[in-house]
Amino acid sequence: MNSVTYTQLQELVTRIPARKLPAAYAILSKLTDEEETPLSLQATFLSLPLPERRRLLAQQAEDILTQSYYAETAAEREEWQGGDFDDY
């Protein structure tokens, strides 16, 4: 939606018939009383500039690689993954 200036809104209000002013006031009053709902994490992420999103994703990928399962050595993984299926 295109942005609207205060001047445009004021001009529009001056063209509203007097009998409809209470309804217009009620609508505008309700709009100002409503709190804006915060963006979801996904929407917040998508609102970031592309280079910043790429940086964050690269950082998350690096973090995953350095955590638990991926940080274990081959010997440690073999220890808990090893064995034949018939051993169970």
Image (tube, helix red, strand yellow):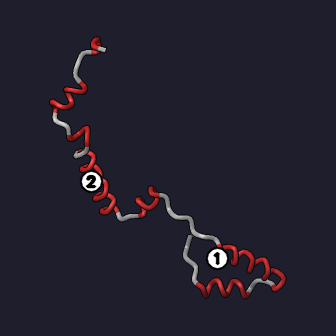
Q: Quadrant of residue 50?
A: bottom left
Give x and y (percent) for residue 7: 61, 88
Q: Which mark is residue 58?
A: 2
Residues packed near mark 1 inside 10 Å, few (<14), some (14 to 19) or many (20 plus): few
Q: Residue at x 18, y 31 (%)?
A: 76
Q: Are marks 2 and 1 in contact (CB under 8 Å)?
A: no
Q: Secondary structure at mark 1?
A: helix
Q: Disc 2 to disc 1, how far (Cα)?
A: 40 Å
Q: Which mark is residue 32?
A: 1
Side (left or right) of 47 relative to 79: right
Q: Amino acid at mark 1?
A: Thr
- Comparing 1 with 78, the one in front is 78
Relative to 82, does residue 34 appear above or below in the rendering? below
Q: Residue at x 20, y 37 (%)?
A: 72
- Give the left or right position of residue 44, taking residue 71 as reference: right
Work out whether mark 2 precedes mark 1 in sequence or the reverse, and give the earlier one: 1
Tell me which residue sits at (16%, 35%) in the image: 73
The percent position of residue 75, horizontal first and vertical second, equals: 15, 30
